[in-house]
Amino acid sequence: MTYTPSLKPNTRIDVADILRGIAIGGIVLIHFIEQLNFYMFPEASSQTMAVINQGVWDATFFLLAGKMYAIFSMLFGLSLFIQHDNQAQQGVDFRPRFLWRMVLLMLFGLFDLLFYNGDILTIYAVCGVFVVPFVRANNRVLVAAMVLFALQPIEIIYIIKGLLDPSTQSLNLGSSELFKAILPAQAEGSWLDVAVAGIEKGFLVNFTWAIEHGRATQTIFLFLLGILLGRKRLFYDEGNNIRIWKRVLVGSLCAFVVLFPLFKIVPEMVDIACVKKSLKVMLNMWKNLSMMLFYVSGVVLLYYRTKARDILIKIAPYGKMSLTNYLLQSIIGGFVFYNWGLGMYRYSGHTSSLLLGVVCVILQYIFCRWWLSGHTHGPFEALWRRLTWLGKKA
């Protein structure tokens, strides 16, 4: 398949680093309020504290859950486009090197599983392979693939099956049982117990949960979306891009206003369990997507057209070290909450867990500023980059 590279250079996109920083910060906060997939919260000290905890939980999930992951995934696709296009401009096919890069990402993910069973890097590594056939496809094929994965095809199949046969069971690959099997290691075990459980069961938990909850197909869609946005150069301030982002801002807000009540109401109107669950998964993915696009377009417009640019750019260092920050939050969070470390799951409710996450983000940010004052890449980013080009002649 012939691929025509861009005629313009793919320069560093500061607003993408800002969005990446916002996304990884939000992911850390979600993981901390969840106690890194532990969910063993102590009883609130009072009724007032119970109300506060529930409010903090609801607000955090409403604002961040699914949306930060979506931003992060979309930017992964953007990075793939930039790397591929830069090499294409030099007459090099980056796809074999990208597949090797996914092998390396899988290894990073396996390292992450030694500390946290909710790793997303292994999911990215597998979904990245599914994206490779579309990297050089024309825009029509790319958009067609995007629509297919965005529609949540697995859920559509189960909705149809449920309507034809109401006794059809919902998709269940066993993620709940695997997840429960990991809890004893987190609650009572050593780090080695957590690591073994993460490799033996956490790896499967991630994939089964991602398929059961629409995350796998959504991730592939978001990777493809990032590639398309990269081709269109929408993250640069050129042409009529700002006008496009204004339309995205309004359109995504309108979509969320419609999808949020649909998500709350429509599944509850259905009596068939299989159809109910699939509708909830599908509408939840679409709802999160609309809110994600609202966030992204808002940040882009603030950066390029307001004085907020000077404040937003300060987030960029945190986004430049997103891989390092992601892996470090697993190590830090595991130490904070699990039995092998401080065992804070015994004492920390929703509010205090979120505050611990804020402290983690602040400390990571300080580290990023310090590290990048003497290096061009974060430690894990530099390692991934060096290993990516292993064997390449200078």
Image (cartoon, rainbow, N blue to C red):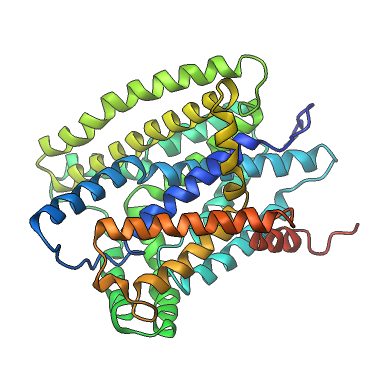
Which of 240 and 140 lies nearest the eye of the viewer? Answer: 240
Q: Residue at 31% across / 60% down in the picture?
A: 353
Residue 352 location, x and y as percent?
A: 29, 60
Query: As drawn, is 48 to the left or to the right of 105?
Result: left
Residue 68 location, x and y as percent?
A: 43, 44
Q: Quadrant of residue 41?
A: bottom left
Q: Is residue 3 above or below residue 368?
A: above
- The mark total stands at 0
Q: Quadrant of residue 304?
A: top right
Q: Residue at 49% across / 32% down in the picture?
A: 296
Image quarter hosting the N terminus? top right
Q: Quadrant of residue 192?
A: bottom left
Which of 52 and 148 lies nearest the eye of the viewer? Answer: 52
Residue 67 location, x and y as percent?
A: 40, 41
Q: Is residue 242 above or below residue 161?
A: above
Residue 121 in sight in this render: no
Query: As drawn, is 372 to the left or to the right of 214?
Result: right
Which of 204 and 298 lies nearest the eye of the viewer? Answer: 298
Q: Is residue 140 above or below residue 325?
A: above
Image quarter hosting the C terminus? bottom right
Residue 178 in sight in this render: yes
